[in-house]
Image (cartoon, grey):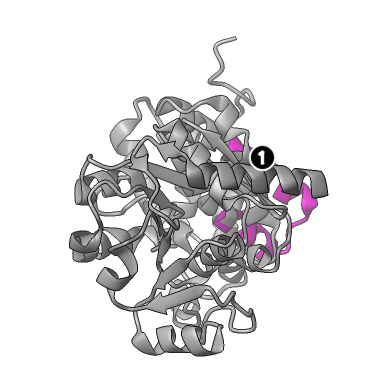
């Protein structure tokens, strides 16, 4: 581990002195993180631990003051002590004007309005790394679409995904993620800047594969939580998650994703973490639904966002719009079933019982050979 850590440190020093596809680095490299929720705090912590001056853009100046003076967030993971080289502000111009890289962690459904509001503060050409996942309900677009429609095509974008709970990242627990970008040099530079002995970053050019995995896994986690809430056993949970991953693969291939991406960290890997991890917001939301609570009561009782709820409805609409074929609900029974439960047309018990009474089909009926 020590030898690996020294290699990462050497790589980071090289990156800080080299050119990127966007031109030479200013000195020192400065990071701005947009969004002061759990994952924004986590990625700001990663950057700060690596010695990078990091500014966290939050909504409230009171929150910013608390972070700057007491070095913890008053609402999210308030027991976590933040590195002292994280500075917080509620002023977009202060946070973004001199940033070398910008990391976006605002939830998907709020991203478009947020980006429109701060776009004039973002320097021309500054690369953006998105850690937000999901499908926008209004446009049925992924984060890549939202960025290009709001901030334009004149800057490179990258997308981070993988099994990565914010609390474990802050606590320095070993974590592996992947960054996807059309610009592989950007992905490589970001991997070098973020990686250390507890946070390992891989790279890929398969942006759509990473985005589909990051969106679908949250919906599968809702179903896994419902399964647990209903008191069903390990057999049911294992079968449900496996079949859900099959639907993820089927959808990804329709959009041109690589099977290896869907079987990797951003697909199956993130699905396992989100379905089985005790820190998963989507699994918890599904669990409470399975126990009989209403969506309204669950949402009213927490400030955390379970991205899979809105993504589920958008995902079904996307499938109906983009995918061809008869009886799409038989090709994506879990994704359609979760959406119908969230829309109130059936209960979790009815939905999971419906999966057991489906027509008999081959396990992988869509394979050509």
Which one is in front, 246 or 125? Answer: 125
Residue at image location 22% in from the left, 50% down from the top: 124
User: Going by the image, does 29 lie left or right of 228?
Assistant: left
Tell me if residue 115 can be seen. Answer: yes
Q: Quadrant of the C terminus?
A: top right
Q: Is residue 196 above or below residue 319?
A: below
Which one is in front, 166 or 184? Answer: 184
* SS at circle 1: helix
Residue 236, horizontal then vertical, whole percent? 72, 49
Q: What is the crowding at mark 1: few (fewer than 14 residues within 10 Å), some, or many (at least 20)?
A: some
Residue at image location 64% in from the left, 83% down from the top: 79
Residue 125, horizontal then vertical, whole percent? 26, 46
Q: Main secondary structure of the magenta part?
A: helix
Residue pointed to by mark 1: 242
Residue 277, horizontal then vertical, whole percent? 69, 60
User: Going by the image, does 118 lie left or right of 58?
Assistant: left
Q: Is residue 315 above or below residue 168?
A: above
User: Going by the image, does 212 lie left or right of 202?
Assistant: left
Tell me if residue 344 can be seen. Answer: no
Which one is in front, 212 or 75? Answer: 75
Q: In which quadrant of the rendered view does residue 181 lie? A: top left
Residue 280, horizontal then vertical, whole percent? 61, 63
Numbered circles on residues, count:
1
Residue at image location 56% in from the left, 65% down from the top: 48
Q: In which quadrant of the rendered view does residue 283 lie? A: bottom right
Which one is in front, 350 or 318? Answer: 318
Residue 79 is one of the magenta-drawn residues: no
The segment highlighted magenta reads 222-247
User: Going by the image, does 15 lie left or right of 196?
Assistant: left
């Amino acid at each position: 581990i020590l030898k690996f850590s020294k290699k990462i440190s050497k790589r980071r020093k090289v990156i800080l002195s080299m050119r990127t596809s966007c031109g030479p680095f200013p000195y020192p490299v400065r990071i701005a993180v947009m969004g002061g929720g759990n994952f924004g705090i986590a990625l700001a912590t990663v950057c700060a631990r690596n010695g990078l001056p990091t500014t966290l853009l939050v909504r409230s100046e009171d929150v910013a003051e608390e972070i700057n003076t007491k070095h913890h967030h008053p609402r999210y993971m308030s027991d976590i002590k933040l590195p002292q080289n994280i500075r917080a502000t509620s002023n977009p111009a202060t946070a973004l004007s001199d940033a070398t890289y910008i990391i976006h962690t605002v939830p998907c459904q709020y991203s478009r309005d947020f980006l429109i509001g701060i776009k004039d503060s973002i320097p021309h050409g500054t690369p953006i790394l998105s850690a937000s996942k999901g499908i926008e309900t209004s446009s049925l677009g992924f984060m890549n679409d939202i960025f290009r429609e709001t901030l334009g095509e004149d800057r490179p974008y990258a997308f981070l995904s993988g099994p990565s709970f914010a609390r474990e990242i802050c606590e320095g627990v070993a974590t592996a993620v992947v960054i996807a970008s059309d610009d592989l040099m950007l992905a490589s530079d970001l991997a070098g800047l973020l990686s250390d002995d507890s946070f390992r970053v891989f790279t890929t050019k398969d942006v759509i594969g990473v985005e589909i995995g990051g969106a679908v896994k949250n919906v599968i986690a809702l179903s896994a939580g419902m399964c647990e809430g209903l008191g069903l056993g390990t057999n049911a949970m294992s079968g449900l998650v496996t079949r859900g991953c099959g639907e993820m693969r089927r959808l990804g291939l329709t959009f041109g994703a690589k099977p290896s991406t869907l079987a990797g960290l951003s697909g199956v890997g993130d699905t396992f973490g989100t379905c089985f991890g005790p820190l998963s917001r989507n699994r918890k939301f599904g669990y409470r639904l399975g126990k009989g609570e209403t969506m309204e009561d669950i949402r009213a009782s927490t400030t955390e966002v379970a991205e899979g709820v809105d993504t589920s409805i958008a995902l079904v609409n996307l499938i109906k719009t983009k995918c061809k074929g008869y009886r799409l609900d038989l090709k994506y029974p879990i994704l359609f079933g979760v959406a119908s439960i969230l829309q109130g047309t059936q209960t979790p018990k009815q939905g999971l019982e419906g999966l057991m009474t489906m027509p008999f089909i081959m396990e992988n009926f869509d394979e050509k050979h």
